[in-house]
Image (tube, rainbow, N blue to C red):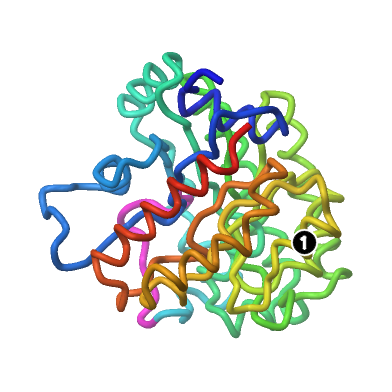
Amino acid sequence: MEIMNPRDRFKALMSLKEVDRLPLMEWAGYWDEEGLDRSLKDAWEIRRYFGLDSYRQYWISPRSSDCKIPARHGGPIIVNMDEYLELKPFLYPPTAFDKDMIQSWAMEQQKNETVVWITLEGFFWFPRTLLGIENHLYAFYDQPELIHMMNHDLIEFNLRVMKEFCELCVPDFMTFAEDMSYNNGPMISKTEFNKFIRPYYGQIVPGLKELGITPFVDSDGDIVQLLPWLTEIGIEGVLPLERMAGVDIVAIRRQFPKVKLIGGFDKTTMHKGCEAMRAEFERLLPVMRQGGYVPSVDHQTPPDVSLNNYLLYVSLLKEYCIKSGH
């Protein structure tokens, strides 16, 4: 089979068609390890440095650059409706992305040299970033009107920026940042999901699919219970499939054969050397051969992974992606 370009390869794989090999992709490609060339400026350059396929990601934030940030990780910026209304001038910026950059990406995409991927903040994620982790979960019961107002404003923003982005470049796939699950499953019930999350996805997902954009949800933790909720609203794929949360992509593929998957490689094997990483690729190989799956680290590469071990990982990734082609 002839060698495919990165974009055709990704699109074919997501359509369960034949490919020359699987995409070489690191969805969380940032690397901060001694020994790496410090002239590399961003995730795209780092991917290219390691010989991975070209993926261009743009995270479209609903916050302006001068929006307040929490005093601590997971802490609140606001606590009630009045404070949200005071913060709104610093949210939903009229210019949400670099149009010149996206036009240059569109030229690469038109030549099939790169896969364009955008991230929007989802309807569980965004309110949490404003209210903080604990207050957000209480707010579903104590301040439901505030959650709905935030998500009403967010869907208007997301629809606007998607329209503006697609006038320049139609992404090949996109992720909604959510992190709606933890190690024991979803952090809200199906009832609350249907009430507070589902209506807003219903306003954006059909339009994405009409444009040929494959919608993914990015959620850490155990997403098995969450998966039927997502497929019901038209979401086609999930990442990063964290092994430490008990996620087993072999079992997921058996239960949800049509769901697209990115991630799943157990990052805790990476510091152990070649044999441990090869065993992990062997575990994933049956799903790799079925299509609709891009193997990748199941979250950020841990800091205890040496550059040499990461290079081993990349070498094995290339070997198994070739082995899984056709």
Q: Amino acid at mark 1?
A: Ile
Q: Does residue 67 belong to the magenta stretch?
A: yes
247 or 187: nearer the viewer? 247
Residue on which the image places disc 1: 252
Q: Where's the N terminus, which quadrant?
A: top right
Q: Secondary structure at mark 1?
A: helix
287 or 219: nearer the viewer? 287
Give me the residue at 70% from left, 28% from top.
17
Give me the residue at 63% from left, 64% from top.
283
Give the side of residue 51 with respect to residue 57, left or right.
Answer: left
Which image quadrant for residue 300? bottom left
Give me the residue at 43% from left, 51% from top.
26
Residues drawn in magenta: 61-72
Give the side of residue 224 with respect to residue 191, left or right.
Answer: left
202 or 258: nearer the viewer? 258
- Estimate the x, y position of residue 47 in percent, counting from the top left: 32, 45
- Estimate the x, y position of residue 113 in percent, counting from the top left: 40, 23
Q: Does residue 168 belong to the magenta stretch?
A: no
Mark 1 crowd level (few <14, some 14–19, many ≥20, 10 Å Cα): some
Is 86 situated above or below 234? Answer: below
Give the side of residue 47 with respect to residue 213, left or right.
Answer: left
Is 213 situated above or below 215? Answer: above
- Estimate the x, y position of residue 135 in percent, counting from the top left: 60, 82
Is 149 situated above or below 260? Answer: below
Give me the residue at 57% from left, 47% from top.
294
Q: Where's the C terminus, which quadrant?
A: top right
